[in-house]
Structure formats: structure tokens, C-alpha cells
Image (cartoon, grey):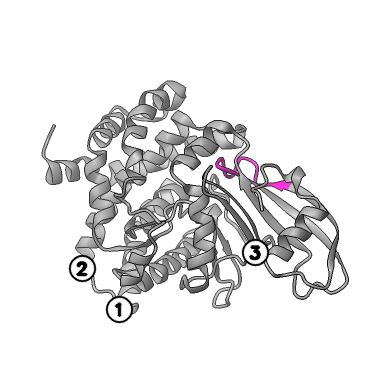
Amino acid sequence: MAVPMSASDLDAAWLESALRHAGHLSGGSVASVSHQIIGEGVGMVGQLARLTITYSGEAGDLPPTMIAKLPSPYEANRAQMQAFRYYVREALFYREVAPRAGVRVPRCYWSAIDTETNLSALLLEDLGHLEVSDQIAGMSPALAERAIRAAAKLHAKWWQTPELDALDWMDFGNGPITMQAVPLFHYAWPLFLANGFERLLSPDQIRLGERVRDRFEDLLNDFGGTQRTICHTDFRSENMFFGAPGTDDDVVLLDWQLTTRSGGLYDVAYMLAQSLSVEDRRAHEDRLLRVYHQCLREGGIEVPFEEILEYYKVSLMVCLVIPVSVGGTLDMANERGRMLGEVITQRTFTAATDQGCAAVLDARYGTD
């Protein structure tokens, strides 16, 4: 089936065909479907719609609502996602990895992949009854700890396993697709500053950004070249749902578009730096890093804590590409999108300077 580009394309006939194609609908039919756009300003790289469905006849265990995930309606955003094969990567994740991921992910009812255009679309389980944390407001340290434990579980399961070799559609953290982020950082940096983000940064933070830009290829090689596992690579609060602790829905992870085979510490740095308030990160950062370290050990992975801390700092610098690319190249869609861009800029650059990342650059690559 073709990849739909708009929620208005998802009528009853289309949905019935998609569900039959995926083997979920045999005797029954789709009587009606309505859609509601959700998540505006939360994600800028796709569009989400909640489908409310009525069935006629035998529909098995199909639910009354699903989430349709479609390509972004914004051309610049969609083009960047196509270049990095993010849409295709997520669809393949749900087909090949999700059933054995080691962590709870949404059920996928249908997917379509267009390899010529690098576009995809998904029909996913509706998790709207679970708790989600507003990234702008900042997630609580308690939820952050639950997320850290889930990340460690994912990373430990896939840590240096030969099974990673078979996932040749998933780029390495220093692979040719991910390395496109190097020229992207150079291109986006002046636009990021000119778009009003310079006023959010101190002179030291601007200087750090320039140094990271100039060393970004080295940083990607460090981040992506050793201790590989499956890295979510967009591990932020609004890509997680939380149910009752200790249940199957304790932590549900979604949005697998950016998934890479690379260093798992990037997920930890990404979440702590971008989803917690500066104050909460400073108060809980060391404790949560030690929770991650202990959970890896419980999963059979032995790594010195000093190495965890070192790669955390490297990963913080790799994370700087996110606010820079968002602020410099993406259509931020609406006021909330702009606010999110500003929040992750302030939090990520502050985390990198708090951790003395300039000194890490000096130690690893020498002074400029």
C-alpha cells in the first residue's frame, strides 16, 4: 500500500484495506473512522492522528482507537528525515526489532515503506490512557529514574551482541548516514544563532558550540564506534509513556525513527540534559548515572563508572546538534515548537558547560 501523506486520506475504506493487508481483519469490516490531530508542537518531524474506529462484524481484538503516524507536512522537516532515512528506520524497527526489543513498545498494527522516497507510515497502539511528561515543564526525577532503568535494560540486552550485525538498515552512530550530521552542524550553526538562539547562550557556551562543531566528526566516532548497542537516539520525556510501576506498562518507549547502533550513553545524556529542568538535573545527575551503571551490571554488563562518566560527557557534546539543527533548519511549526527549541538549547548547553566539556575536548583532541 502507498504511504498516506495526510490524516484526511485515512477514511474507512483505506483503514479496512490496511488492516486486511496486515492480517488483522478477516470477517469483519470498518464501518466508520474519524481522526483528530494530536501532538501539535510536540514533534516537528511527523504528524500524528488519533483514529476513532467502529467495526461491523467480527473485528477480533482490534481496538476502538489507533494512532496514525505519518510523514511531516513541513517540506524542510520531511526532507531532513528522508535524507537520514528516519521514517524507514522506524518502520523497520517495528517489523524486525520490536517483538524482541527487551523493553515495552507500542503494538504496531500496520506499516508501509516506500524505499524510493524513504517515507513510511504506521498504525500504532493508542497509549493515551498512560502518563506522559511535558518536556517543556520538565519531567520529575522519579519518572527519569524509571526511564533510565528502561534504557539500561534495552542497552544491556543488545550490548555488543552479534545480533546487531543483522540490522544492516540501522545506521551506526558513526555510519555514513549519521555522519551527514557533520555538515548539517556546520550549515545550521550560523542560522541557529541568527534565528534568535544566540541570546540564550553565554559567550563560553557559544565558544563550546563552535569547538564542538569543528570536532563533531571526532565526537561521532567516539560516540558511535565503541560499546555498541541499540540506542534509541531520541530518548526524551515526550517519547515515553508511564503506567503503574512494576506493570507491563511501567515504561513504554516510542518514536524509534532515530535508532542507531551506537553508544547507549547518548540516550542517558539526551534525556538528562533535555528533559529535566536544569535544577533537577544538577541535583540528581550523579545519582541517576549510578542507577544506570548499576542496572547495566544487573544486566551482565561490566563497565567502570569512570568510563560511564567519560562517555556521558562525550555524548552531551554530541547532543548539541539537536538544538542547533532544530533552531537552524527545522520549521518549528508553532509557538510550542519554538518554546521547545529554546528550552532544549538552554538545558543542553548548560549541561555541557556544567560537566566541563571544553576540558574533555582538550584532553581528547588537544587545544585549538
Q: Which quadrant of the view contains residue 344?
A: top left
Let me know if residue 83 appears in the view. yes
Callout 1, which amino acid? Gly
Q: Rate crowding at label 2 as few (under 14), some (14 to 19) or many (20 or more) other CA atoms within 10 Å.
A: few
Front-most of 127 and 63?
A: 63
Numbered circle sitting on residue 165: none
Q: Position of residue 357 (x, y in %)?
A: 24, 44
Tell me if 173 is positioned left or right of 29 in this view: left
Residue to which mark 1 is pinned: 300
User: In the image, what residue occupies the spot 35% across and 39% down?
Assistant: 180
Residue plotted at (37% across, 63% down): 288
Please, what secondary structure does the residue beneath circle 1 have?
loop
The C terminus is located in which quarter? top left
Task: Look at the magenta stretch and give its main secondary structure.
Answer: loop
Give the mark nearest the N terminus, 1 or 3.
3
Q: Nearer the viewer's eye, disc 1 or disc 2?
A: 1
Q: Which residue is mark 3?
A: 130
User: Toward the viewer: 249 or 273?
Assistant: 249
Magenta region: which residues? Answer: 37-46
Label 1 close to label 3 by CB (< 8 Å): no
> Relative to residue 29, is residue 154 drawn left or right?
left
Residue drawn at point x = 31 percent, y = 49 percent: 175
- Decide: few, some or many residues near mark 3? Use Cα within 10 Å; few <14, some 14-19, many ≥20: some
- Which amino acid lies under the numbered mark 2 shown in the image of this protein? Pro
Judged from the image, the secondary structure of the residue bearing numbered disc 3 is: loop
Residue 304: image tag: 2
Indicate the amino acid at tag 3.
Leu
* For discs 1 and 3, the disc positioned in front in the rendered view: 1
The location of residue 133, given as percent across then percent down, is 57, 55
- Tell me residue 157's x, y (percent): 38, 73
Q: Is residue 37 left or right of residue 331?
A: right
Viewed as shown, does residue 103 lie left or right of 284?
Answer: right
